[in-house]
Amino acid sequence: MFLLRLSGTLSLVVAISTLACGQHIVDLYRPLYESQRGPLLEPESGNVSQACVNGFNYLLFNKTKTVLSALDAFGKLEPGFLVGNWAWLGHFTECSNLKDYHYCLLTLEVDASSLNKSVLLEDIPIQWGVCAPNDCTKDDVHNSVYTLLDFLHLGSNGLNLVNVSAAVTCVDKPVVPYGAGFIACMVLCAILGILMIGGSIIDVVETWSHENELTLSVQSGDIEPLLANSEDGHQAVNGGGHRIQPLHQMQTGWRRFLSQVLYGVRLVFLDFALNRNLGKLMKIGKANERNIDCLNGIRVLSMFWVILGHIFFFPVTYGGLFNIADAMLWTKNFAFQVVLNAYFSVDSFFFLSGLLVCYITLLKLDKRHGKLPWHWFYLHRYIRLTPVMLTTILIWMYIAPYTLWGPKAALMAKRPFCPQYWWANVFYIQNFYPAHFGQSCIAWTWYLANDMQFFLISPLIIFALYRAPLVGFGLIGSLLAMSFSVTGFITAKYNLPASPTANIETPSADAPDVGNLLYQKPYVRIPPYLVGMVLGYALYRLKDRQFTINRALLALGWFVATAIALLTLFGLYGNSDSHPLGKAGNVVYEMFSRFAWGVFLAWVVVACKFGKAGWVNNFLSWNLWTPLSRLTYTAYLLHPIVITTFIGNFGLPYYCSQVLQVFYFFGAVLLSFGCAAILSLAMEFPLVNMEKHFMPRM
């Protein structure tokens, strides 16, 4: 009860009085404030520990500089209460710098249903920062405030206007205790660093040694010995310029075994060599008629779009916005529909996946006369994706929490579901299990689960397209019909909005969970993947042909494609509670919007591939996109960690400004791709290199 008297009680009473448009509550409790003289907590008070009681009584009745600083750090009523500024965070660093105090954040749930109707929600979550003595646990803080509310007749024993959420967090140093997981991650990072640096040293030394030997041989006119160590002179030097001695020429017995081990260790180091992999990352490939260069630009821009959507969405998710009412007004802006509909960026990735897996596999089937080692087909995909994803889980669980330092650090550092559900990612079922989206370990990998599930069924369609195209198209048509039907049925049954962000200005706790019902389910997200597969087959059939189209049809194609894109992105503009789209409109939009987006992308790719896109193709095929496109997978995995780190270090309520969001966006893009480059060079590229030692070329 002492806590709110220090600063928050007055703030709370003033806030509630403002809502009620009266002073009667302040007048009612003023005599209580004036009558308090002795210690506010006795040893037997509530469920508060004796040490915490002593700490707060000392805080109340001493006037040292430390005490004044602690009182000053308490959260207080902020301006803009009626427009959503419910984050009374106080001064985090002022409290954290005090030796005997730590910062705690709790949530006061205010029932505003019977108060002033100008507030945004009926139940107002007020985040209140408390500078509590170190001897006070989060349970002590919770119980103290709970007791105070009852004393003021604001809690369950009185007017029942305010409740204290059980989710009280206290920020200590470190935010999360160091454990075996953190140590294991540091060891893993050290091993990867040693392999990268060691491999680079070996590569440089061998290159230098070989160049010197080659120079001496050329000068002496005897270059044959350099080529004699290999059965084929062209294979005597590997891709990095180093001689490779065949295993069959090594010594016999234990010496041969030792030589093989050392040779294998050398290959592992070279697979991790930083200089080699950096060269592969930055390499710009030669022009090839069978390449589809515009896909690089589409892939990178789609990744930018994902980050743009999340840089707006994540602050809302974690709460504590200074001017959430202003942010809600953005949703009524026409141009802002691009942000609200950023989820189409993931549909772009599905489209690209379907296109590439179909196109490339058909080319391989053509080359191998209709035969492919399908077990290697699946294994390659699993090795390509899984280790990097599991490394991201380790980073999220055991490294990311230590990058947080702010009022919400302890709250955002919690990983309650990862120990229980991380294994779902190993089997790519995280879009079905756990049942609730928020319980996934790294929830944003729902996309990878869908992509893997589509990949699992893709050989059936691809082989059918190769052997009997009509059967293949029949399968695709059946899957599309199933997707449209299921999506429409679920949307109609639960009366879902037309998009996950529709009617965002009036959130409701009773609203159906769009994420679990539609957003992350494969039977809803498969249409753009299938559109991509159709285009992949078409490009395969046209691989050696010239595609011509007259200007009228070209103009019509661009007109229709542009109209589809605009309707998809901006078709929900103006849709709100006052002007609803209607149930039928919601069903139609949910059923066909993703398919329509895939059709738009298909036209862009066709136009670019066959030189009918002009500056659009020049932009999407820009060489700058090539190295960035190799980082989109790791950037997708890491960008939420980058954004949460950014938000977790905010010491004040998050101020919503479209201009500031632009700065935040470019910063998130730069850091996300920078971190992606590190992860790719440390793990993704080396694993691809190692895979080539045992996996046959397909």
Image (spheres, rainbow, N blue to C red):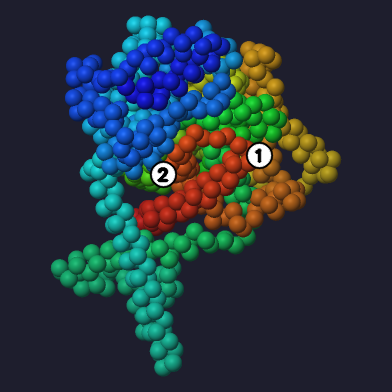
Q: Residue at x 15, y 68 (%)?
A: 254
438 shown above or below 298? above
Tell me which amino acid carries mark 2.
Leu
- 193 lies left or right of 13: left
Q: Residue at x 25, y 34 (%)?
A: 134
Tell me which amino acid carries mark 1.
Ala
Quadrant where the N terminus is found in the figure: top left
Q: Which mark is residue 385?
A: 2
Is residue 492 or residue 138 the one in the foreground? 138
Q: Which mark is residue 602?
A: 1
Q: Residue at x 42, y 37 (%)?
A: 91
Q: Residues within 10 Å of mark 2 (few under 14, many from 20)?
A: some
Q: Provide residue 547's location: percent of width, then percent of height.
A: 73, 48
Q: Secondary structure at mark 2?
A: helix
- 478 lies left or right of 546: left
Going from N to C along the chain, the mark reached first, 2 or 1, is 2
Furthest-left residue in view?
254
Is residue 545 or residue 391 the one in the foreground? 391
464 shown above or below 582? below
Q: Provide residue 252's location: percent of width, then percent of height.
A: 18, 71
Q: CA distance from mark 2 to mark 1?
A: 25 Å
Is residue 426 or residue 103 the one in the foreground? 103
Q: Provide residue 169's location: percent of width, then percent of height.
A: 33, 30
The quarter holding residue 118 reads top right
